[in-house]
């Protein structure tokens, strides 16, 4: 069966989705692209050499295109509305991260998926990178021992002009700064690989981007029910963009990008390299077959297999919601200057978009309202995490 795919949004991430579904051969065909301006959709179609239709109204496009797969790449504030409409009109949905700007909207999307029985997948392309997949399997194998401490560095660099784009830098339209939009990749991996914490303590600030209401730096400490801890740092001021995760277990440390360390204590407690365990870990890691499709293509392939074969989603709606709950806990703790205990319930102000917007600090006044950049080359998180 060939699935008809409608892409909603013609921004900088659109080519990644075109390439992802294109990599699946005759299993999928992009039949249309939706953008606010017809010319943007046409340019995306022409650049990719697609036989597709340009639309400006996603409702019309869903009704007329005959699509059964919808890929949502619009700014986060519209994800819920578009996703629910698509699900309720017979489509399966792949929605870009962050899933939505609030937990209330995430739950609305999850409810629509349950009611309709259609698939809802959330983009988490780093899960579909072979080195990361292998590290996850190795961590779950028990060979490294119990996870004790996780360190996450979601370090990026963005110049001031990054926030000149109209929808960026505003709590109302973007929903958050580096924690929500950039660290979402690594927070997703943290929740996937270490689980959900019980308590979060955090602080945020804006140290360099004076044209943005939102944070460009955040730090958080996480406490888990099993006694383990995690530490997260995210910012937009780190030249080199060195992003990494480190999982300190009883017997070894697993790192992303890939690295392994293992020691055994000497009589005086000081370490000596455990070469036998290192050899065993490296052999187990290398023995795992590579993924057939990576990045966005891996998610596209997984969604089609979920629809056609009933395969479990690699990153489903609940996974997307878990990531958002961690982000909201960081924001709540930072704004209230106090630890936050999960879960965040519907009666909590940080459950809704309005509650978040009215309680988060507005560091600077939003300036710059470009509709698009002339030069818009981007670097995906997966480029730095393989």
Image: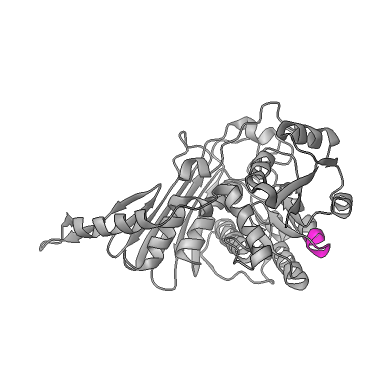
Q: Judge left or right: residue 216 versus residue 281.
A: right
**How many numbered circles does the render carry?**
0
The residues colored magenta run: 84-90
Tell me where residue 41 sits by quadrant: top right
Residue 173 visible from this viewpoint:
no
Residue 224 in the image: state x and y as whole percent.
44, 69
Q: Judge left or right: residue 296 versus residue 223.
A: right
Tell me where residue 330 sits by quadrant: bottom right
| Residue ID at (78%, 57%) | 68
Q: Which SS type dominates the magenta stretch?
A: helix
Residue 328 in the image: state x and y as whole percent.
60, 60
Query: Which image quadrant: the C terminus?
Result: top left
Query: Which image quadrant: the N terminus?
Result: bottom right
| Residue ID at (68%, 52%) | 27
Query: Is residue 89 one of those drawn in magenta?
Result: yes
Q: Judge left or right: residue 102 versus residue 63.
A: left
Tell me where residue 303 sits by quadrant: bottom right
Viewer-proximal residue among 364 and 228: 228
Viewer-proximal residue among 335 and 18: 18
Residue 83 in the image: state x and y as whole percent.
76, 58
Residue 275 in the image: state x and y as whole percent.
19, 55
């Amino acid at each position: 069966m060939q699935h008809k795919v409608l892409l909603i949004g013609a921004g900088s991430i659109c080519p990644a989705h075109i390439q992802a579904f294109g990599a699946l051969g005759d299993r999928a065909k992009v039949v249309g692209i939706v953008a606010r301006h017809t010319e943007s959709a046409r340019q995306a179609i022409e650049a990719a050499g697609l036989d597709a239709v340009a639309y400006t109204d996603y409702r019309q496009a869903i009704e007329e295109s005959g699509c059964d797969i919808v890929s949502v790449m619009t700014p986060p504030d519209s994800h819920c509305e578009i996703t629910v409409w698509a699900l309720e009109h017979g489509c399966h949905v792949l929605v870009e991260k962050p899933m939505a700007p609030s937990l209330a909207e995430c739950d609305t999307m999850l409810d629509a998926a349950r009611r309709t029985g259609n698939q809802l997948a959330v983009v988490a392309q780093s899960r579909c990178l072979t080195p990361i997949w292998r590290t996850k399997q190795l961590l779950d194998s028990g060979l490294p021992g119990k996870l004790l401490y996780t360190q996450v560095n979601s370090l990026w660099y963005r110049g001031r002009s990054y926030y000149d784009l109209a929808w960026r830098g505003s709590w109302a339209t973007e929903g958050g700064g580096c924690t929500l939009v950039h660290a979402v990749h690594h927070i997703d991996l943290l929740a996937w690989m270490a689980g959900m914490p019980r308590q979060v303590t955090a602080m945020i600030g804006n140290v360099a981007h004076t044209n943005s209401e939102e944070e460009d730096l955040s730090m958080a400490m996480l406490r888990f029910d099993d006694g383990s801890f995690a530490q997260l740092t995210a910012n937009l001021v780190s030249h080199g963009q060195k992003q990494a995760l480190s999982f300190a277990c009883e017997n070894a440390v697993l790192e992303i990008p890939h690295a392994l360390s293992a020691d055994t204590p000497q009589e005086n407690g000081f370490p000596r390299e455990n070469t036998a365990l290192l050899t065993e870990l490296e052999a187990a890691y290398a023995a795992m077959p590579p993924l057939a499709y990576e990045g966005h293509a891996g998610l596209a392939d997984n969604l089609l297999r979920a629809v056609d074969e009933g395969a479990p989603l690699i990153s489903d709606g609940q996974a997307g919601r878990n990531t958002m709950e961690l982000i909201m806990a960081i924001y709540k703790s930072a704004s209230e200057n106090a630890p936050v205990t999960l879960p965040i319930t519907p009666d909590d102000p940080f459950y809704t978009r309005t509650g978040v917007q009215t309680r988060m600090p507005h560091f600077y006044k939003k300036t710059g309202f470009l509709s698009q950049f002339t030069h818009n080359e981007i670097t995906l998180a997966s480029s730095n995490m393989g």
